[in-house]
């Protein structure tokens, strides 16, 4: 079965750029979505089709992909950006999530 | 604005059954998925159903034990779960899969999530 691998945690200082990676075989041939889940809340879509921000996602959030690695970047990181971030892709009719990355801004 | 509201969760013993329901307001004709999250764990896809209910797919761990259905006239979606196991304990989210202008299984994203309903399986 298809797998996506994320680092369990990423820490960044306020104002710096956070980068969260997502690795998958042949990922360059797939579109990737990213979700943020704050404590006690449902996940929320922040990036789709690898690079597109839906309405409501701050411009500080951006997505990119190179080879088998997709990356979510958050510039000028703020405390409000903290949460668990999940990457997601499709494998035929199946939804595949990465293991999630806990972003801490401190 | 589209909203999804789940219900039907609860506490059951191993081997028991539950029927989860999800009602949409601002309904549109989209794929719907059920995603679950065990306490403190990652998101896990459970099942997806196509707009007309004909296409369905399940994660291997629930195949044969779960059935997904929809009633578009009632703007409702269902996940029937039988032979429940302790490892099925999780919050279950009803989620819209939006094609984002392409084919849902290529460009799609899960753009609307319900608040979740909790399923607890224990003896």
Image (spheres, rainbow, N blue to C red):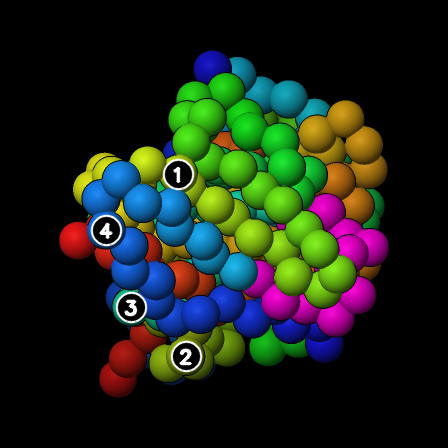
Dot 1 falls on a residue whose secondary structure is: loop
Mark 4 Cα-neighbour bin, 10 Å: few <14, some 14–19, many ≥20? some
How far is mark 3 from mark 2, CA to CA?
Answer: 13 Å
Position in image of residue A49 (x %, y %): 68, 39
Specify whether A26 is left or right of A58: right
Which circle marks residue A75 in the picture? Answer: 1
Ranked by sequence position, the earlier of labels 1 and 4 is: 4
Read off the chain for label 4: A
How far is mark 1 from mark 4, CA to CA?
Answer: 11 Å
On whether residue A31 falls in the magenta region, the answer is yes
For the residues bearing labels 3 and 4, Cβ distance under 8 angstroms? no
Magenta span of residues: A22-32
Specify whether A30 is left or right of A24: right
Same-chain status of marks 4 and 2: no
Dot 2 falls on a residue whose secondary structure is: helix
* Residue receiving disc 4: A13
Can residue B32 be seen from the camera position used here? no
Read off the chain for label 2: B
Position in image of residue B96 (x %, y %): 58, 37
For residue B19, above or below residue B62? above
How far is mark 1 from mark 3, CA to CA?
Answer: 27 Å
* Residue receiving disc 2: B87
């Amino acid at each position: 079965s298809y797998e996506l691998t994320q680092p369990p945690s990423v820490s960044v200082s306020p104002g710096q750029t956070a980068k969260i990676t997502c690795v998958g075989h042949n990922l360059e041939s797939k579109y990737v979505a990213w979700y943020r889940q704050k404590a006690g809340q449902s996940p929320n879509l922040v990036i789709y089709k690898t690079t597109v921000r839906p309405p409501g996602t701050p411009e500080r959030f951006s997505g990119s992909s190179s080879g088998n690695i997709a990356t979510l970047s958050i510039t000028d990181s703020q405390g409000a950006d903290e949460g668990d971030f999940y990457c997601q892709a499709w494998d035929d009719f199946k939804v595949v999530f990465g293991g999630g990355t806990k972003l801490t801004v401190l | 604005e589209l909203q999804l509201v789940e219900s039907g969760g609860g506490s059951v013993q191993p081997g028991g059954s539950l029927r989860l329901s999800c009602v949409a307001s601002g309904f549109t004709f989209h794929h719907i998925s059920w995603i679950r999250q065990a306490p403190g764990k990652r998101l896990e896809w459970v099942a997806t159903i196509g707009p007309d209910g004909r296409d369905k797919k399940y994660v291997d761990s629930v195949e044969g034990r779960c059935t997904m259905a929809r009633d578009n006239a009632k703007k409702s979606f269902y996940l029937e779960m039988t032979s429940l196991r302790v490892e099925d304990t999780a919050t279950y989210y009803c989620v819209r899969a939006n094609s984002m202008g392409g084919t849902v299984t290529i460009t799609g994203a899960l753009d609307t999530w319900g608040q979740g309903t909790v399923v607890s399986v224990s003896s």
